[in-house]
Structure formats: structure tokens, C-alpha cells
């Protein structure tokens, strides 16, 4: 008799495509099947993501349900005995061939992609101890300075827990949290989060500023900003001004800021552990097109930084064109505006530089690139 959860997983995989990401299909499926148990939901999520992570290792001749089952067995085998998988096989089958042309593909990085992702949460400054008491399966991060960062190792649906409903926690990857800590906004300052999306980093900046000062949070997606407004209300963040950025060449923020964060749209290669389907839908042309968007956004954000203020560039990708390539191309413009590179310490490796890569095997989270400048 067929496992009904595998049948649901197969139906989701069949619907997935370049414009239909797996996480959206999962949300829609769970909405259509409200009586699925938490155990079934977890099993379906794992089945779908294990399939996309291991699909090139399984037999193509079997049925889709058989392939899903085989992919799950392979994921379990890798968890128990990672050394039994050869680096050359992982490099050939766990990532698309073209990625080798735009970034260094190390053994450590590819192996990290095949591991199950860790779940990170951020507690509001004043309630961390209470959160740990309410969520006993959470544990503090070992990274120095990440005082509100917790790893959740339990099985509860965090979206239904009291700490989440009451706004005491946000589900936010540790590398994403690193961007907020490195930005280091002070209470009373003015900041602009130029590509705020659904607000994860803006809410972190607000918490670090203790709700004092002002954060302009803009994005070109009205839908994402609407979601952000709900999150901000739940998090009791009241020093935010959320505004749609309608036209790229018309800045929605006119005032000079102590800091501008450009967390730009990117290819998302840094999230391939958490989102393995994207490995097979992303195309090389996407990297080229996104690089120009990133340069344009930095060019718009930089003039709004006041003297001695910071410009922070972050992307959850690892490709050369979108990381060091962007920094190289924008350096002339930034220099003409009085910016100089600002060195900072990589919280995961300890390295000092003005541009840093957070590799998943070092951070335990998404891959991320960050560069910083100060305006003289």
C-alpha cells in the first residue's frame, strides 16, 4: 500500500518549476489539507527537499514515488556516513555544472549543501531567557556577540508557539542575523533598509536600536511589504516607516542616514542547502542580470549616507559576479562620493576584511556575502 504522504510529496514535486518554488507549493498543499498532522507535514517537507537535493543520485528508471523513497534513504545514509560519499561524485551531481564557472566549489561547501539545514531564531533582547524557558529545545548560539541568536532543535511548529504569536521571536537564519549585528545601528540613529522585503533585517535593526530613532524600510514588492507590516505589528516595532519603492531612479528616502543597508535581490546560491530546488531552476543569465540590479541599488543608496555613516551591502549568494565583482565595479563611484572600505571581523571565521563571505560550513546557516564602507 502506498504511503499517502509520499503521494502528496510526489504531487508537489510534479507541480514545482522555475516559477513554482517548492516552499510555495508546500504552503498551498498544507492549506488545502488542514487535517494533516505535524508529523506528516514534517515528513512531506523532508521528502520534497531530499528529492531535490539527491535527485541526480537516484535511479531515473523508477517511478517518482520510488525516486522520492530512494532519495530519502540516500539522505539518511549521508547523515550516518558522509565519508562514504566521494567528493568528486558530490561535485558532479549535487550542483549544476555551470556553477563551477562563477564561484569556487569546494568539497566543504558541497558537503554542507547535502546536510539538513539548522533552524535559527532570534529572540527580542529583553525576553531571551523567557524564550529559552518556553522553548526548552532551543539553545544559545556559540558565536561571540550573537546574544539573542538561538538554534531550535525541537519538533513544534514554531509559528504556533506562544513566543512567536506574541512577537518574542523571529525565525531568522544566523547569517542574516550577522548582517544586523555587523551593521551595529545605535539607538536614536536614522537607517534605511533599501530592500527590506518582508522585514527580517529591519526588525533586527529596530531591536538593536531599542525602538529608538528611525528606520526607513522600502521595497518594490507591495505584497512583501504588506506581510512586513503584519510582522512589525506582531513584533511591537514602532520606529519603522514602511514605504513602497515605486521607481528605481526616484529614491523614496530623502534624508541623510547614519546607515544604509542594501540587502539586494540575488541569485540565492547561499540558500541552496535550505532550498535545493533552486539549484536546478537558476540559470547563468540570472546571475548577470542580477549583478546590474545590485549595482543600481548601491548607486541609489550611497548618496543617502551622511558623513561618517555606513553603507552595508549584503547578498545571500556566493557567485563572484554578485559579490567581489559588484564591489570592484562600484568602487569608483563610491570613492568619488567619499567612501572608503570599512574593515570588520567575520563572526564565523575571525578574518578581518572590508568584504567577507560567510560559508555555510562555518556559520551553520546560509551562505552570505557582506561588504561595508564608511563615508569620509
Image: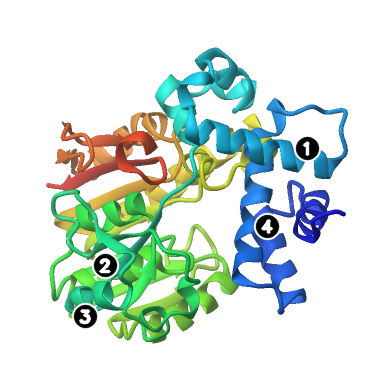
Q: Earlier in the sequence, mark 1 or mark 2?
A: 1
In the picture, measured across the screen, residue 156 lies left or right of residue 344, that is right
The residue beneath circle 1 is 67
Relative depth, front residue between 362 and 225: 362
Q: Marks 4 and 2, Cα distance to the nearest angstrom?
A: 35 Å
Residue at which label 4 appears: 44
Above or below residue 329? Residue 309 is below
Mark 1 → mark 4, Cα distance in angstroms: 14 Å
* Cα–Cα span, label 3 and label 1: 50 Å
Q: Are marks 2 and 3 in contact (CB under 8 Å)?
A: no
User: Is label 4 in a helix, a strand or a loop?
Assistant: helix
- Nearer the viewer's eye, disc 3 or disc 1? 1
- Which quadrant would the N terminus be assigned to in this image? bottom right
Residue underneath mark 3: 211
Indicate the secondary structure of the residue bearing disc 1. Answer: helix
Tell me which label, 1 or 4, sits earlier in the chain: 4
Near mark 1 (Cα within 10 A), the count class, few <14, some 14-19 or many ≥20, is many
The answer to whether residue 80 is above or below residue 139 is: above
Q: Quadrant of residue 255?
A: bottom left
Q: Are marks 3 and 1 in contact (CB under 8 Å)?
A: no
Q: Are marks 1 and 4 in contact (CB under 8 Å)?
A: no
Amino acid at each position: 500500500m502506498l504511503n499517502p504522504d509520499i503521494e502528496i510529496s510526489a504531487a508537489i514535486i510534479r507541480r514545482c518549476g522555475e516559477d513554482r518554488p517548492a516552499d510555495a507549493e508546500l504552503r498551498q498543499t498544507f492549506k488545502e489539507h488542514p487535517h494533516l498532522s505535524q508529523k506528516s507535514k514534517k515528513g512531506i517537507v523532508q521528502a520534497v527537499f531530499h528529492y531535490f537535493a539527491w535527485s541526480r543520485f537516484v535511479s531515473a528508471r523508477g517511478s517518482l514515488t520510488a525516486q522520492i523513497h530512494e532519495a530519502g534513504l540516500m539522505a539518511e545514509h549521508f547523515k550516518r556516513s558522509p565519508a562514504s560519499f566521494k567528493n568528486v561524485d558530490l561535485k558532479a551531481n549535487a550542483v549544476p555544472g555551470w556553477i563551477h564557472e562563477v564561484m569556487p566549489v569546494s568539497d566543504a561547501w558541497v558537503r554542507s549543501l547535502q546536510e539538513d539545514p539548522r533552524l535559527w531564531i532570534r529572540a527580542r533582547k529583553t525576553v531571551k531567557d523567557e524564550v529559552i524557558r518556553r522553548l526548552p529545545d532551543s539553545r544559545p548560539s556559540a558565536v561571540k556577540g550573537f546574544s539573542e541568536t538561538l538554534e531550535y532543535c525541537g519538533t513544534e511548529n514554531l509559528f504556533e508557539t506562544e513566543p512567536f504569536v506574541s512577537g518574542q521571536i523571529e525565525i531568522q537564519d544566523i547569517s542574516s542575523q550577522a548582517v544586523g549585528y555587523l551593521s551595529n545601528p545605535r539607538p536614536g540613529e536614522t537607517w534605511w533598509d533599501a530592500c527590506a522585503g518582508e522585514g527580517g533585517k529591519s526588525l533586527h535593526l529596530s531591536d538593536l536600536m531599542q525602538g529608538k530613532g528611525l528606520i526607513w524600510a522600502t521595497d518594490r514588492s507591495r505584497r512583501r511589504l504588506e506581510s512586513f507590516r503584519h510582522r512589525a505589528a506582531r513584533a511591537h516595532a514602532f520606529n519603522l516607516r514602511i514605504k513602497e519603492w515605486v521607481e528605481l531612479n526616484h529614491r523614496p528616502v530623502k534624508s541623510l542616514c547614519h546607515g544604509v543597508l542594501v540587502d539586494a535581490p540575488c541569485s540565492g546560491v547561499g540558500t541552496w542547502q535550505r532550498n535545493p530546488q533552486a539549484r536546478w531552476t537558476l540559470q547563468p543569465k540570472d546571475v548577470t542580470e542580477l549583478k546590474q540590479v545590485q549595482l543600481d541599488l548601491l548607486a541609489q543608496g550611497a548618496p543617502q549616507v551622511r558623513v561618517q555613516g555606513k553603507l552595508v551591502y549584503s547578498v545571500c549568494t556566493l557567485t563572484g559576479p554578485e559579490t567581489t565583482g559588484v564591489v570592484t565595479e562600484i568602487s569608483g563611484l563610491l570613492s568619488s562620493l567619499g567612501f572608503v572600505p570599512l574593515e570588520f571581523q567575520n563572526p564565523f571565521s575571525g578574518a578581518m576584511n572590508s568584504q567577507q563571505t560567510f560559508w555555510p560550513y562555518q556559520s551553520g546557516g546560509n551562505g552570505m556575502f557582506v561588504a561595508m564602507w564608511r563615508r569620509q
